[in-house]
Amino acid sequence: MPLAIKPVLVTVARDATEILPRIVFPHEVPVLEAIHGEGSVALANEQPDFAPVELEGGLDEAFSRLDLNYGADHVRSVYYNQRDFESACQELYELEAPKKPARGGAKPTPAAEE
């Protein structure tokens, strides 16, 4: 299911003298903090009005992109697995939980003929 996510501008303090601006999705911020240390990533004071970016593959694509960009070890230090990532994104982006098919439900009965 496609998903549109609005990027944010953050600053990443690599050390005391090097602070870099980065445009990322909000779900990337905890991964950046895991890589660079807690407190090293901050939302920029002034946020540009970025247009949402459509991810055709939805949360599956977003999770794959995290692995590609940051490495599975860093991603798993924040999001244990894809299900954990999806739960975090549902809360972060206020998404509805996917509907699960009913298990062992009664089969519909055909309408009686008159």
Image (tube, rainbow, N blue to C red):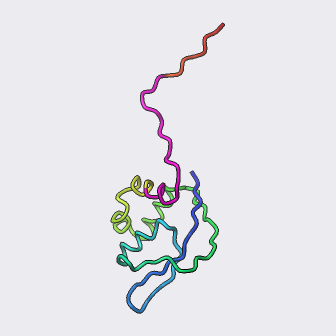
Q: Is residue 22 left or right of residue 104?
A: right
**Closest to the observer, 70 or 52:** 52
* Figure label count: 0
Q: Residue at x 54, y 17 (%)?
A: 109
Outermost residue toward the top in this view? 114
| Rendering quarter of residue 67 | bottom left
Outermost residue toward the bottom in this view? 17
Q: Is residue 55 above or below residue 21?
A: above
Assess whether residue 90 is covered by the magenta stretch.
yes
Outermost residue toward the front in this view? 45
Q: Is residue 24 above or below residue 113?
A: below
Q: Could you say where residue 12 lies in the image, as x and y percent from the top left?
A: 45, 81
Q: Could you say where residue 78 lies in the image, as x and y percent from the top left?
A: 36, 64
Q: Residue at x 51, y 59 (%)?
A: 61
Q: Could you say where residue 77 lies in the image, as x and y percent from the top left?
A: 33, 65
Q: Is residue 39 above or below residue 27?
A: below
| Secondary structure mainly formed by the magenta segment | loop
Q: Is residue 38 left or right of residue 52?
A: left
Q: Could you say where residue 114 lies in the image, as x and y percent from the top left?
A: 66, 7
Q: Is residue 14 above or below residue 27?
A: below
Q: Residue at x 43, y 89 (%)?
A: 18
**Closest to the observer, 7 or 62:** 7
Tell me which segment is drawn in magenta. 88-106
Q: Residue at x 45, y 71 (%)?
A: 29
**Closest to the observer, 76 or 89:** 89
